[in-house]
Amino acid sequence: MSVPLNYALALAAVLFVTGLAGVILRRNILIIFMSIELMLNATNLNLVAFSRYFGNVNGQIFVFFVLVVAAAEAAVGLAIIVSLVRHYKDSLNGDEFNLLKG
Amino acid sequence: MQSLIWIIPVAPMAAAIINGVLGKKLGKATGAVGILAVAISFVMALYVLAGVMAAGNHEGPLADGPFYQWIVSGAFNVQLGYYIDPLAAVMLIVVTSVSLLVHIYSVGYMANDGSFWRFFCYLPLFTFAMLMLVLANNFLQLFLGWEGVGLCSYLLIGFWYNRKSASDAAMKAFIVNRVGDFGFTIGIILIWLTFGSLSFTTVFDKASTVEVGFLTMITLLLFVGACGKSAQIPLYTWLPDAMEGPTPVSALIHAATMVTAGVYMVARMYPLFIHTPVTLSVVAWVGGITAIFAASIGLVQNDIKRILAYSTVSQLGYMFLALGVVVPVSGIFHLFTHAFFKGLLFLGAGSVIHSVEHAFEHAGVHDDPQNIQNMGGLRRYMPWTAGTFLIACLAISGIFPFAGFWSKDEILTGAFVNGQYALYAIGLVTAMMTAFYMFREYFLVFEGTPRFDTHHVHPHESPWWMVGPLAVLALLSLVAGFAVGAPPEHGLFRNFLDPVFAPVLGAEHPETAFVETLILIGASLLIAVIGIYIAMMMYLRRAWSPQAVSARFPRLYDLLYHKWYLDEIYDAAIVQPTLAFARFLWGFDSGVIDGMVNGVGALIRWLGQGLRRLQTGSVGNYALGMSLGLLVILGSLLLSGTFHG
Amino acid sequence: MNAPTAVFIVLAAVAVVSSLNVILRRNPVHSAIFLALTILCLAGEFVLLNAEFIAATEVIVYAGAIIVLFLFTMMLLDIRGGMRTRQFQNQFGLAAPIAVLLVALLGAAVGAINISGLPAAALSTLQAAQLGSVQNLGQELYSNFLLPFELASLVLTVGLIGAIGLAGHGAEDREEQVRIEEALEFDTKVRAKEGGHLEPEEELVPAGGHHA
């Protein structure tokens, strides 16, 4: 095993928390969305690392499916953003979308 | 025979279902459906009677077959079945024949009622329940029919439910019957605990093995139920009020059939009652006191139907008296004849009310069409009704050779022969009162000069739908008495019922000398004639002024006129305290219980008001919440050392 | 330290720095470019972990499709408005410590993991090279994972239709616009009522409730 598992896991952890921080800190919904993609990729790294570690290809197959879902999600999510900004509020500020306030 | 018995109760039930479901569409055709169904039952009842007669002196039930497995729960096993013996056969004939005639009569009587179809749903339903009661071969099925007739009685008394007095009377009947049924239910439970079975055959077979004290308790409780259903003291107050129902209902339910269910039940349970002298004397005295008490009230009443109602209570007392002095055959015989002449009296009264009500309405007179003081001389307008009514009056007064003579005389003779002289005297006085108030009613309604404005009010004879049944019942009131046969001790009716009662009573009947019998007959005839004579002098000849008589005994008259103030006493002693207690509980319910429930609701509301602030609507806040959760889970996993495994 | 590990650390450093740029930049276009850089670094890591096919797919799907999609979206919208305002949410004071704590906890977790407890596969170089090959993956995808694979195509189709439905003809859909406006109006009224600023005649009663 050329690259130690720990290294990959540590990198994945850092990337994941970075993405999470983006989601809970930023107001711009486009950047929030990109942070989500970052988190997805962090998990992908985990999957690939364990796949190599156990010598089992299933982890990589799973990454493949994550990519598929991420693509679909990006398309739908961006369409929602476009629709929201056009019809609801001319703003990219996530704090302003609070129609569900109790 | 046995394979077809189920048709008897099922035919009216089918009619009730058809009329209940499709009644609105069928309209007047519901009457035909009801008549057809009850006619089928009547034919089947005749068939059963023929079968029982053919069987001759057969001990025990001819048929005791289950036809439906009802309840199985451990040792508790109840099957719906039928118990066919001469007693059941007699009751089947009475119920189906009177029911059939009342159905026919009702087509005329109810013709102008908007709820015609509803009436013809309840009436077959009642017939079904009554037949289930009669055919029962176990206590639970008996109770089913018992409650079924009670329910139908409630529905039919309150048939004109938009009249407050009618719905009050219906509730009164239902609630007073609950008191009786409470005792009846406990009696049934005790029977189950004692005998381990509810089947009649099993219970009767084991009756002699049970301790007498215990049996006394059971039979007294059963008699409490009979008191409620058959309107005996102290539970009789509902029956006079039940006259709020349509008159055919009064004739069928509150004169001929349902109110005799208590008598039938005690007669059916005779194998139990015979072992308990205490209960028997209670039955006899309650019956006797009720007979004279109700008759005394009947002397002064003015409502054409209420007089008949008190008369019914009084005659039911006679039947219990007969059962109590151990002449059950006479009691059942009186039940048999009474069904016909009392049914006839009620139907006749209905015919009068029907006619007078229309005549008053037509003339714009606002007098009470049920008050006999507003009538008089009606014989000229409705001869058929008057003729049949007279026959019924003669029958109930016990005039030879009408039906009541035979059966009443049988009871009085039985009481005398068995040494119950006090009860015999009571019966005799009651007989005189009966003759008096029946002829008072007859004279005030049909004879003398009309006390209404003859120029404007024109009553006329009822339609043939109504007069036909009257004629049939009048014929039966004439001839039913001959069923007793001669001599009475070994006559047709006694021989027929012997298989039921002979094994219970033992073979020996106290024989009466011929002369003694003749004297007893003479005495009861004489007393009836005296009663009629007094009525004639007071109300037909007007030789003795009724006003003068009542003025002479003002307090007694007042007491009788207000029915011994028993309704008022019940109201003060039972109804008002119960109402006060109910109001207290209502206050407790709305204050404390509802307060607690509402308090819980208010608490939740208050919490919700606080918690809704968590729903900011901002997605960022939700993500933060998830991160916090993640933090907690990760922290607890680390602390628990999961990663070090 | 062997050569692959060294390369891994260099790429990781670049990835971390550019990912921080993704979430800290004011201009979303810059964020998107840095996201692409992060993706490329990750693809490199995938190659180091013997996942060549996945690495290629990652570059094609993310850098080639998703990030381009983001950039197109930004072209459609006015992103300068978002750049002029405050960049961080109101909950910054609470969120930042949580993020830092999470890094600390995850670091502790990674450090604490007992790797030797996991059964590592001792693959030869040849076996390791074959692990992520197109042949190997294809065999798995078209045999054991055939049904999920087909479902994935369905997901993509639905996503495509959904995206067109949502964004495709929005501008002409006046009816929807009206509905949203009504909902907003109601929302404002409810809030005004709670605040107690509502005029009596504006009370929220059903139509025809009272005509006083």
Image: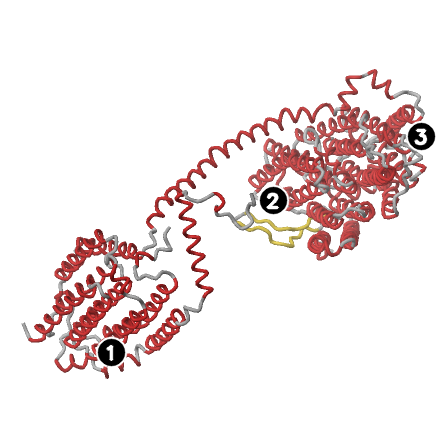
Q: Please, what secondary structure does the residue beneath circle 1 have?
A: helix
Which image quarter: residue A72?
Answer: bottom left
Q: Residue at x 53, y 33 (%)?
A: B586
How far apart are the two marked residues, 2 and 3, measured between alpha carbons?
Answer: 59 Å
Give me the disc on residue B198: 2
* Amino acid on which disc 1 is placed: Ile
* Image mark 2: chain: B
Q: Residue B69, position in %: x, y?
A: 60, 53
Q: Position of residue A95 (x, y in %)?
A: 30, 56
Q: Residue B406 placed where, x, y %? A: 85, 35
User: Which mark is in front, 1 or 3?
Assistant: 1
Locate the C terminus of chain B by quadrant: bottom left
Specify the amino acid type for callout 2. Leu
Q: Locate residue A53: give its quadrant.
A: bottom left
Mark 3 residue crowding within 10 angstroms, few (<14) / some (14–19) / many (20+):
some
The answer to whether dots 2 and 3 both sit on one chain is yes
Residue located 77% across and 24% down the image? B561
Q: Quadrant of residue B262?
A: top right
To which chain does the residue with label 1 belong?
C
Residue B252 lies, with reference to residue B69, above or below; the image says: above
Question: Where, quadrant-wise, is the N terminus of chain B in this rendering?
Answer: bottom right
Between residue B118 and residue A95, name the one nearer to us.
A95
The label nearer to you, 2 versus 1, is 1
Chain label for disc 3: B
Q: Can you identify the residue that label 3 sits on?
A: B449
Q: Is residue B645 visible?
A: no
**Which residue is label 1 attached to?**
C60
The answer to whether the residues at label 2 and label 1 have Cβ atoms under 8 Å apart is no
Given contact means CB atoms under 8 Å apart, are the residues at marks 1 and 3 in contact?
no
